[in-house]
Image (cartoon, rainbow, N blue to C red):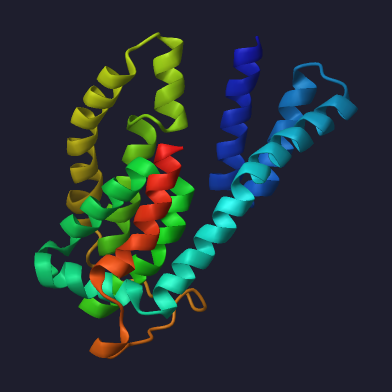
Amino acid sequence: MPLVIVAIGVILLLLLMIRFKMNGFIALVLVALAVGLMQGMPLDKVIGSIKAGVGGTLGSLALIMGFGAMLGKMLADCGGAQRIATTLIAKFGKKHIQWAVVLTGFTVGFALFYEVGFVLMLPLVFTIAAAANIPLLYVGVPMAAALSVTHGFLPPHPGPTAIATIFHADMGKTLLFGTILAIPTVILAGPVYARFLKGIDKPIPEGLYSAKTFAEGEVPGFGVSVWPSGVGGGLLGGG
């Protein structure tokens, strides 16, 4: 019975968000309240459980998201994102820039949680799209695909790690087979799927990015530009 109630809650959540376009946070709180009451929990216990769950999640993510956003902003404002973008475009060419984004996203996503990698890579994707004069979705989808696949398939991310623990699977083999499955998945969900979206040219949302162009002598070197993200990923992965 509890699983049935949870399934009903998931269906209700999807219905509120997709059919009725309700704000995701509000829908999540309402569904959590409904599921708790259907499980027979007292109202005060339901509210306390929601507060503890939301507080625990935000407590662990608030600093990461805050500092990640600041790092991404600094990367864009000092010209680091422009240096990375121009280097990748020069090495891979405009035609193959998606593969550069996928490779970068896969590398970043292996060490960082999805939300942190997304915040760090967003300014880079904006800069690449503006510098190469290509649709945002054409490079944004491969980036999101790479981060999503690493988060869903590869330890030490929470989902794959939890599944491996539940089934008493060897963590090394889980990583190996996860990588084997991740590579074709990210290719299909990233560069291949994005080709169908190339004709959709959605502008970058106003206020999220300003096309600031730096002269060649004003931007840091490629190694210096990559260093902050690399150190952050290394520290998190090593910890």
Residue 237 left/right relative to 173:
right
Identify the residue at horizontal 34%, vertical 74% (top origin).
Answer: 80
Identify the residue at horizontal 31%, vertical 68% (top origin).
Answer: 224
State the residue in front, 180 or 175.
175
Tell me residue 165's x, y (percent). Answer: 44, 14
Tell me residue 194's x, y (percent). Answer: 23, 56
Q: Is residue 167 placed above or below 234 in the rendered structure? A: above
Q: Is residue 107 placed above or below 81 in the rendered structure? A: above
Tell me residue 155's x, y (percent). Answer: 37, 29
Q: Is residue 88 placed above or below 166 in the rendered structure? A: below
State the residue in front, 156 or 50.
156
Residue 103 left/right relative to 10:
left
Task: Answer whether residue 111 is visible to the viewer in this image.
Answer: yes
Q: Is residue 174 placed above or below 183 in the rendered structure? A: above
Identify the residue at horizontal 60%, vertical 14% (top origin).
Answer: 3
State the residue in front, 16 or 144.
144
Number of numbered tags placed on the structure image = 0
Task: Answer whether residue 93 is visible to the viewer in this image.
Answer: no
Quadrant in which the N terminus appears: top right
Identify the residue at horizontal 59%, vertical 59% (top origin).
Answer: 66
Tell me residue 32's x, y (percent). Answer: 71, 32
Residue 76 left/right relative to 134:
right
